[in-house]
Image (cartoon, helix red, strand yellow):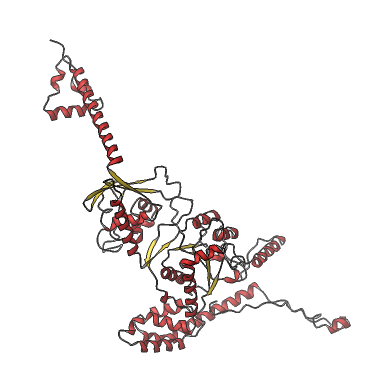
């Protein structure tokens, strides 16, 4: 009888040996019997190799069958995150609880989306939820409950499936494998929908339904795009995915009715179907530009929001005072704009677009300081441009607005608090086709602000005639051309639903505001007096030393100051 084979523990280090033992136990065969046989080692290797060979053939056959089915028996649709169809689809998946029932998902807090880690996780999540969709939150609508911020569930990259109209649909969601978090741009995501059947009509109907439901839900909303947060360090600036907000009614913008009608009619005429062809036949660039200027609080941004809602166009907001963009990134942002949209450039005077005369004054003043071997300190007056922190140059701004790479069909709105500082090249016809001055509230605007905040009372407690009468009385108590619509609205918000009490308190409010404005005016006068001291008045010369010519000249004994231009100090100073 031959010698016994080695014990089973000898082979435990061989990869896959435990799998072979488990198969033997499933089959009811004792592997220890092989160890007592002279040929145990060879039999174990033979059985193991046979099993692995069979598994290899089975996997290869299964792969061939899968490839055949994918090539001939199924249809698929691929959607990239760079296209708006991606938002259509993820919104539909979230509304039908498909994205929230995935087995693999990310979990973040909605409040913690301000942190870099949470934003990085939300990049891979359901981007449709950036449009304030609450179907993926635990519990009722809202970001918080009695315990604190709610959780946000977003599907992670992977494979999931669901049933739609009796057919299974497989979703394969993946990110660009070449993307790195140090690149600075958002990763490109791809979603592939696969279903059984050679006809693509089934998936096309699904995508058409997703598009229809998305657009119907957004019919009375305005999508506002801002700069995406730079969460990966210094990077190329891009637009974010947008946030849908309820469209603002144009009637809630308080300004002279003639000016409001003028800009609305001009925008509608520009967007009419035949206008683009009219521009093309005459070789004109199909663009339209507007300049809104006036003191802060007069409704420049509000008018832009209302126009976007009135014209059903997306709004892209870009502030040049942030200092986070340069010429190259500004051009890239304009290249990424859709064909029809509204672009709002806020604080346009911060892009080196000030008047050349102010720049020359700055240069000559700096040279004088260097000549005196003193460190230059900018003078503290309104004629000196106090902005300029943004790295966007004037030429870069002009190239982005109407350069070769800029799109046609968009509406450009620029806002500024200081029109007098803008360079004439920026606001010339062709770049700015219409200027709208939004100043202090006149009597008509004051009346409209009052009626706008108490219009619900016209059909409830008080009649329309009573509200109109109180509105006219309110306009008589508030001086025209002194306060901005925002100031008046802020006062009335303290008396919501109480128009009579607002009438009783408005006189004291006006008196207090005027007192504060007067104090600021006096402080500004004192500051200007320190920065511009009065000229020296020399005593008259003795009569004995005066020549006949000098005696006839009144300026020989008295040095008068040079004539200066006095700037009127308005009530907003």
Q: Can you see residue 175?
A: yes
For the C terminus, the quadrant is bottom right
Residue drawn at point x = 88 percent, y = 83 percent: 548
Q: Please count the marks in the image.
A: 0
- Left or right position of 245 against 524: left
Judge left or right: residue 324 versus residue 549.
Answer: left
Residue toward you, 36 or 394: 394
Q: Nearer the viewer, residue 486 or 100?
A: 100
Residue shown at 36%/81% (left/top)?
455
In this view, the residue farthest toward the front is 281
Residue that sits furthest to the left in the current view: 28
293, above or below 449, in the image:
above
Closer to the camera, 204 or 62?
204
Q: Quadrant of residue 348?
A: bottom right
- In the image, residue 85 sits, relative to residue 278, either above or below, namely above
Residue shown at the point (25%, 56%) measured from the top left: 97
| Image spot of residue 80 (x, y percent) | 38, 50
Q: Residue 476: x and y, percent?
A: 46, 88
Using residue 192 as the reference point, say whether residue 475 is left or right of it: right
The N terminus, quarter of image: top left
């Amino acid at each position: 009888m031959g010698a016994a084979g080695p014990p089973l523990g000898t082979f435990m280090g061989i990869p896959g040996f435990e799998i072979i033992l488990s198969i033997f136990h499933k089959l009811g065969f004792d592997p220890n019997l092989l160890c007592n046989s002279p040929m145990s080692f060879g039999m174990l290797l033979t059985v193991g190799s046979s099993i692995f060979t069979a598994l290899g053939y089975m996997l290869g056959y299964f792969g061939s069958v899968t490839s055949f089915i994918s090539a001939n028996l199924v249809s698929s649709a691929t959607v990239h995150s760079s296209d708006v169809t991606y938002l259509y689809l993820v919104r539909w998946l979230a509304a039908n609880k498909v994205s929230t029932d995935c087995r693999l998902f990310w979990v973040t807090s909605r409040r913690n989306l301000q942190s870099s880690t949470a934003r990085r996780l939300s990049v891979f999540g359901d981007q449709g939820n950036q449009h304030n969709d609450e179907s993926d939150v635990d519990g009722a609508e809202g970001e918080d409950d009695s315990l604190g911020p709610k959780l946000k569930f977003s599907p992670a990259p992977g494979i999931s499936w669901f049933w739609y109209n009796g057919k299974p649909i497989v979703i394969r969601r993946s990110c660009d494998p070449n993307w790195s978090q140090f690149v600075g741009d958002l990763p490109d995501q791809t979603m592939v929908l696969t279903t059984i059947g050679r006809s693509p009509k089934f998936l096309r109907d699904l995508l058409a339904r997703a598009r229809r439901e998305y657009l119907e839900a957004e019919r009375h909303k305005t999508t506002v795009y801002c700069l995406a947060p730079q969460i990966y360090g210094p990077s190329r600036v891009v637009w974010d995915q947008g946030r849908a907000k309820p469209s603002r009614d144009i009637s809630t913008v308080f300004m002279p009715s003639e000016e409001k009608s003028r800009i609305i009619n001009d925008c509608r005429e520009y967007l009419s179907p035949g206008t683009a062809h009219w521009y093309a036949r005459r070789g004109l660039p199909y663009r339209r530009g507007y300049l809104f200027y006036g003191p802060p609080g007069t409704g420049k941004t509000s008018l832009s929001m209302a126009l976007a809602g009135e014209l059903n166009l997306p709004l892209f907001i870009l502030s040049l005072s942030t200092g986070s963009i340069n010429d190259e990134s500004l051009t890239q942002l304009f290249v990424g704009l859709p064909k029809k949209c509204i672009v709002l450039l806020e604080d346009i005077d911060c892009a080196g677009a000030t008047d050349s005369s102010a720049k020359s004054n700055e240069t000559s003043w700096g040279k004088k300081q260097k000549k005196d071997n003193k460190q230059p300190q900018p003078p503290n007056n309104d004629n000196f441009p106090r902005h300029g922190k943004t790295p966007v140059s004037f030429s870069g701004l002009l190239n982005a607005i109407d350069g070769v790479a800029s799109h046609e069909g968009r509406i450009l709105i620029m806002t500024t608090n200081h029109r007098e500082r803008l360079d004439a090249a920026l606001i010339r016809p062709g770049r700015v086709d219409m200027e709208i001055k939004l100043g202090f509230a006149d009597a008509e605007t004051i009346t409209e602000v009052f009626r706008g905040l108490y219009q619900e009372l016209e059909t409830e407690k008080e009649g329309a005639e009573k509200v109109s009468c109180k509105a006219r009385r309110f306009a008589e108590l508030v001086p025209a051309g002194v306060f901005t619509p925002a100031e008046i609205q802020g006062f009335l918000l303290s008396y919501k639903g109480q128009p009579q009490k607002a009438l009783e308190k408005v006189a004291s409010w006006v008196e207090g505001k005027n007192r504060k404005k007067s104090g600021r005016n006096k402080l500004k006068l004192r500051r200007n007096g320190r920065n511009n001291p009065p000229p020296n008045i020399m005593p008259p010369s003795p009569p004995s030393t005066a020549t006949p010519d000098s005696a006839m000249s009144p300026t020989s004994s008295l040095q008068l100051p040079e004539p200066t231009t006095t700037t009127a100090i308005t009530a907003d100073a």
